[in-house]
Image (cartoon, helix red, strand yellow):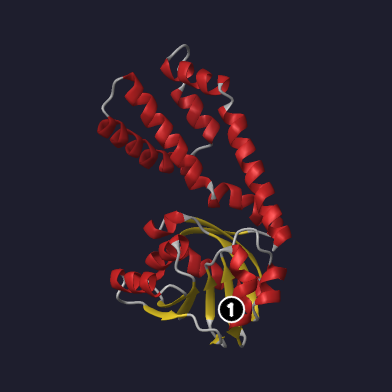
Amino acid sequence: MKLTFIGNGNMAQALIKGLVKHYEIEVLGRNEKSLKALQASLPNISTKILSNNEDITGKHIILCVKPYSLPDLGPKLIGEAETLYSVLAGTSLESLNAHIKAKQTVRAMPNLGAAHLKSMTTLTGDERLKESALNIFNQIGKSLWLDSENELDIATGLAGSGPAYLALIAEALADGAVKQGIKRPDAKVLVQGLFEGFAPLLAGENPADIKDGVMSPGGTTAAGYAALEKGNVRSAMMDAIADAYSKAKELKAKN
């Protein structure tokens, strides 16, 4: 099966690296220099400058452009795609179908873990594409089909934006260790090991049970946890999801 990427930014490149072993990949973009660099790093793909009359008839499109560029992109695409998978945040199925003709359309929200085959991708759209969409995005990690666009917009603030939140936590933990006297390279190794070991824990246990299992009465974890609660970390994380969801709805209203 051949997948045609429109766009070759960070998310597109992450997806391509995860999918290139399983699919024939074609990449259409506007910047010749960046396309050549991508081709050099992944010789098995093909690249092409997007023309002003690009025929997408029968193609399986993965759309990876900035949401604001959709109105300009649409008139450049002629014909009707077989399928359209869009990773544009806050861009509704209605808006996608108004700008790009496709027999079936799905919205997808992967994250940058795709480059390491560890993306958590949420999907919604044409139910006829559900199995195909899950098969494609399961190649780059885990995927979850949601029942509505509203749920996908909420999930965007969690799974889509989540790597940025976790990066902030990782950086803060390392900074805390350095502040107390650990060397920066050692703090980095400790944080990496912490995150690597936490994933399988989370796969098998409830977060509250993990916390209770670590927190001994009057111990070091209890002291540190109290500091996090004092700093309203839990509330701030919940607010991050709410604000990201609001932004997704705002973008959808504009698009």
Q: In front: 61, or 131?
A: 61
State whether residue 250 appears in this view: yes
State whether residue 21 appears in this view: no
**Residue placed under numbered mark 1 in the picture:** 83
Q: Position of residue 216 (x, y in %)?
A: 45, 17
Indicate the quadrant where residue 230 lies: top right
The residue type indicated by label 1 comes to: Thr
**With respect to residue 162, does 233 lie above or below?**
above
Indicate the quadrant where residue 40 lies: bottom left
Looking at the image, residue 68 sits to the left or right of residue 28; the answer is right
Indicate the quadrant where residue 13 lies: bottom left
Quadrant of the drawing holding the N terminus:
bottom left
Q: In front: 197, or 231?
A: 231
Quadrant of the drawing holding the C terminus:
bottom right
Q: Position of residue 188 (x, y in %)?
A: 31, 35
Looking at the image, residue 87 sits to the left or right of residue 254; the answer is left
- Circle 1 Cα neighbour tier, 10 Å, few/some/many (<14 / 14–19 / ≥20): many
Looking at the image, residue 220 sits to the left or right of residue 255; the answer is left
Q: Position of residue 191 (x, y in %)?
A: 35, 35
User: Residue, x 47% and y 44% (percent of image)?
Assistant: 203
SS for dot 1: strand
Looking at the image, residue 252 sits to the left or right of residue 206; the answer is right
Q: In front: 139, or 183?
A: 183
Q: In front: 32, or 130?
A: 32
**With respect to residue 217, does 209 lie above or below?**
below
Q: Position of residue 243 (x, y in %)?
A: 65, 43
Furthest-top residue in this view: 218
